[in-house]
Image (tube, rainbow, N blue to C red):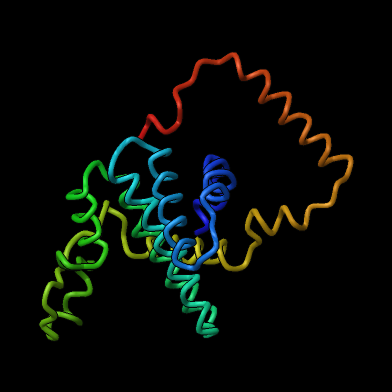
Amino acid sequence: MAPLAHDPGTLFPRLHLYTWAAAPGEYRTYGNLLITFGLVGLWHGAGWTFVFWGFLHGVALVINRWWRRFNIKLPKFIAWFITFNFVNLAWVFFRAKSFSDALKVIRGMLGMDGVVLPARCQPWLQAWHIQGLKFGQAAMGFDIKTIGVSLVGAFILCLLFRNSIEMKNALKPAWYTTLLAAVLAVSGILSLTRVSEFIYFNF
């Protein structure tokens, strides 16, 4: 999965732990994936929600490998839609303090606790008597126009522009890229003396 595959922090377990545990056999490979990504989750935080978050990515990779056996390709949009929503759901466990909190958030994401629409939609939709549909102020105080514009902008950035991997592959060494890399390297070295909290302590 993209979020873990591009995370430098997962490089050691993915390149060393998985390689060390690798052995012939399809089901052994599945087991190695689950163990490796479960430990990747543990590396990110000492809690079962982190382990489960990593484990879910391992499950997704197992399903992906199993699906390839049938040589059936899903339409690109459907494959993207499934992956995008799976990652969104899995990351809930990364941020949640407990499984009960995570499940509460997921219930809200799926509309199982009702869906709130702007009050101005009530005259058109109330006649349908849709169960769980409520009318009032949108979540977090944002109106539907702001949410809609934000979503459209996000989709444009994701779908029409190159991602970091594509930009890396297209990068051609030049004097200005070398200069930029040198500036970033020097800046990083000089900042080593600063005292900062380990980033994952914030979760």
Q: Quadrant of residue 197?
A: top left
| 181 relative to 90 in the view: left or right | right
Check the image and name the residue furthest to the front.
Answer: 24
Identify the image quadrant of the C terminus. top left
Q: Quadrant of residue 116?
A: bottom left
**Horizontal and vertical percent position of residue 121:** 22, 74
**Horizontal and vertical percent position of residue 58:** 42, 58
Tell me: residue 167, above or below residue 113: above
Q: Residue at left 14%, top 64%?
A: 113
Check the image and name the residue furthest to the right.
Answer: 175
Tell me: residue 125, above or below residue 154: below
Q: Nearer the viewer, residue 110 or 62?
A: 62
Q: Nearer the viewer, residue 77 or 68?
A: 68
Q: Nearer the viewer, residue 32 or 7?
A: 32
Tell me: residue 168, above or below residue 120: above
**Horizontal and vertical percent position of residue 87:** 41, 60
